[in-house]
Image (cartoon, rainbow, N blue to C red):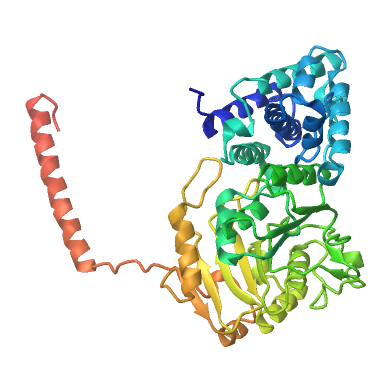
Amino acid sequence: MAQEIKQEDINRIAFKACDTFRGALDPAHYKDYILVMLFVKYISDLWEDKKAEYEAKYKGDSQRVERALLRERFIVPEEAGFKYLYGLRNENNIGELINIALEKIEDANKKKLENVFRNIDFNSESSLGETKDRNRRLKNLLEDFANPLLDLRPSKLGKQDIIGNTYEYLIHHFASDAGKKGGEFYTPPEVAALLAKLVEAKAGDKICDPTCGSGSLLIRVGKEVGGDNFALYGQESNGSTWALCRMNMLLHDMDSARIEWCNTITSPRLVEGDRLMKFNVVVANPPFSLKKWGDEAAETDRYNRFWRGIPPQSKGDYAFISHMIETALADEGKVGVVVPHGVLFRGAAEGKIRQKLVEENLLKAVIGLPPNLFFGAGISAALMIFDKAKKTKDVLFIDASKEYQDGKKQNKLREEDINKIVQTFKAFKTVPKYSHCASFEEIAENDFNLNIPRYVDTFVKEPEVDIAKVQKEIKSLEAELSETRKQMDKYLKELGYGV
């Protein structure tokens, strides 16, 4: 009987491969080598599995086998697969040979993998060290992934999403180890799950993340729909992170996802003719208060995204929010965005933009999150939910900042915390000390300041002190203390210590 492959075993083996680089490379850099090799191992195992299947089906007819393989999801050239590279692990130019193999895989799968491996160099001296050290590290990496337990053939894995889960597992650990840099490419799964439930994407929706990082948030929103009747779109400015996102989509069987490598603000590529593409749902965890976000070109923006106002040069939060609002479908689009709290109350240009968004009746809810949920950001963040189908002018404020699981490195939203937020959001009602349904007039009276404590009073009044009772207790304690001192004096005299 074949040994059952468990998710935790695959995760453990893949994570152990990181030992080759720990201490020598920053996790934000060596993650690329690990994740690319995991991807190559997967598509190679997939190819070998299909090849064996067709050889059995066509009784060794090589031409029919070859024709059938050319119709598969991925094509792995003979001198590019994992087994081929593993056989060359002792070569002095193994880094160069891996680069050549990756180029061949790209060329054979242009539609899905064009440029995906171009941002990573397995022969880089600056990243992997001088020839001797580089060869040793790459040999160890190949040997780690050659572990017989790391069998990623679909015939062994079945329909479980083990490989996609492992990829996410590794990205999570890399983000944690990378600290501040980790927040640039990964949204914690609990926050992604919460946001996915709040925007409620449905079958047939077009879903976009304009700052998609490694794609974890985008994938989670898609999974919330169920089935595969949805379309995913994303944009990412960092080349290596864009490549991780492309691989992440493919490992989750989301081959049709369109992920563009571009700067969302200065040169968006999700366009149709001379207009921005429109989506049913837009979600993002953009970089907090990004400086030099592209303000110099905002006034003449060809897509007129900043008509409500131009955010300050030093804080690009509302640049991303403005883009998201403009790419949401009229009369039905939903937007969910992670923001620093300053977005809720800062004045000047940001205050004017915020006021217009409320006056347009686009803002549906503001949700305060616990501190230290995000990698490299100990501060508390908030969620802003916009809805172009909104009917009432009320805005729901939720203070969920005090309910979470305390962690050493990072705090975490528990399932019950997520459920409470979602249920309160759906009920859209005031809950004492937790939420407040504010009218437009109330927000206007606060000069469109959306700082959550202005609306949700979490102050707990201290119980009144009974002064007479306290005085009585003090007198009683003083009497007991006096009696105790008399007893001590008596014992000391008996022991020969004069007082």
- Image position of 33 with respect to 180: above or below: above
Q: Is residue 341 left or right of residue 233?
A: left
Between residue 278 and residue 316, name the one nearer to us: 278
Residue 402 visible in the displayed image: no
Q: Residue at x 9, y 38 (%)?
A: 487
266 left or right, relative to 491 = right
The residue sitting at 58% across, 87% down in the picture is 441
At horizontal 79% and vertical 46% (from top left) the residue drawn is 242
Vertical side of 149 occupied by 411: above or below: below
Closer to us: 149 or 241: 149
Taking the image as shown, residue 456 lies to the left or right of residue 208, namely left
In this rendered view, identify the residue nearer to me: 435 or 315. Answer: 435
Q: Residue 351: give x, y in percent of width and height.
A: 72, 75
* Count of numbered marks: 0
Q: State the residue at coordinates (63%, 41%).
A: 164
In which image quadrant can residue 197 be found?
bottom right
Residue 297 x, y percent position in the rendering: 91, 66
Pick the front one: 276 or 457: 276
x, y percentage for residue 150?
A: 62, 25
Residue 19: percent from left, percent from top? 66, 23
The C terminus lies in which quarter of the figure? top left
Residue 5 visible within the image: yes
* Residue sticking out furthest to the bottom: 441
